[in-house]
Image (cartoon, rainbow, N blue to C red):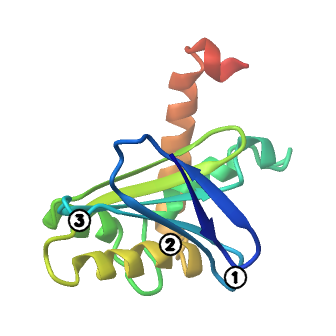
Amino acid sequence: SVMTAASTTEVIKIIKPPLDKRKYETYELPNGLKVLLCSDPTSTSAAVGMNVHVGACSDPPEIPGLAHFCEHMLFLGTKLYPEEDSFSKFLSANGGINNAFTDSEKTVYYYEVDASIDNRFAESLLRFGSFFRCPLFTESATGRELNAIDSENSKNLQNDIFRL
């Protein structure tokens, strides 16, 4: 079936299987962020994904790997939650997981959390949102993450798909 949801600037058609009973809505926030909400009353978990339309092909020639570096650094503290890995620890304590990946055209961040616990989903959104509003990019994490990215790159070069 096809559902139509109105955002502030356009109508977006959501195509879903006929047996999918979930409800979908779309919004565009004042800052231009496009949001797709999917509600499943039978689920006790909530999931969030953010597609940042900047990937490896957007790296400046003088700083290869910048998008991947930013992917790593966003998980390592924000102004509101300065402890490194506090987001992962929060999710782990609340039945959740998180991850991210950078490809040629985009970087995607995503997580899942147990939403049956009061206020945990709301807090997870605040923590996740702070990645994009006020990341720290601390000096102590920078060197460590540069090494981690270099190690990943060396490993990935053994795979044909990464050499294209």
Residue at x 69% of width, y 19% of height? 163
Name the residue beneath numbered marker 2.
131
Q: How many marks?
A: 3
User: N-terminal of the two: label 2 or label 1?
Assistant: 1
Classify 10 Å Cα crowding around label 3: few (below 14), some (14-19), many (20 and above): few
Residue 54 x %, y %: 71, 53
Label 1 crowd (10 A; few <14 / some 14-19 / many >=20): few
**Where residue 102 sits in the image (x, y, percent)?**
59, 44
Q: Position of residue 162 (x, y in %)?
A: 63, 23
Q: Residue at x 22, y 61 (%)?
A: 45
Q: Sequence-wise, which precedes: disc 1 or disc 3?
A: 1
Residue 103 image offset from top left, x and y in percent: 63, 39
- Helix, strand or loop at label 3? It is loop
Neighbours of disc 2 within 10 Å: few (<14), some (14-19), many (20+): many
Which numbered disc flags the more N-terminal residue, 2 or 3?
Answer: 3
Judged by depth in the image, the label closer to the viewer, 2 or 3, is: 3
Question: Given the image, on which type of amino acid does mark 1 rest?
Answer: Asn
The Cα–Cα distance between marks 2 and 1, rounded to whole angstroms, is: 16 Å
Please name the residue shown 55% across and 55% down the image: 71
Quarter holding the C terminus is: top right
Type of the residue with mark 2: Phe
Mark 3 = which residue? 41
Q: Residue at x 42, y 87 (%)?
A: 80
Along the viewing direction, whichever of 12 and 120 lies nearer the viewer: 12
User: Relative to 73, is 58 on the left or the right?
Assistant: right
Query: Which disc is residue 31 wearing?
Result: 1
Distance of label 1 from label 3 (alpha carbons) = 29 Å
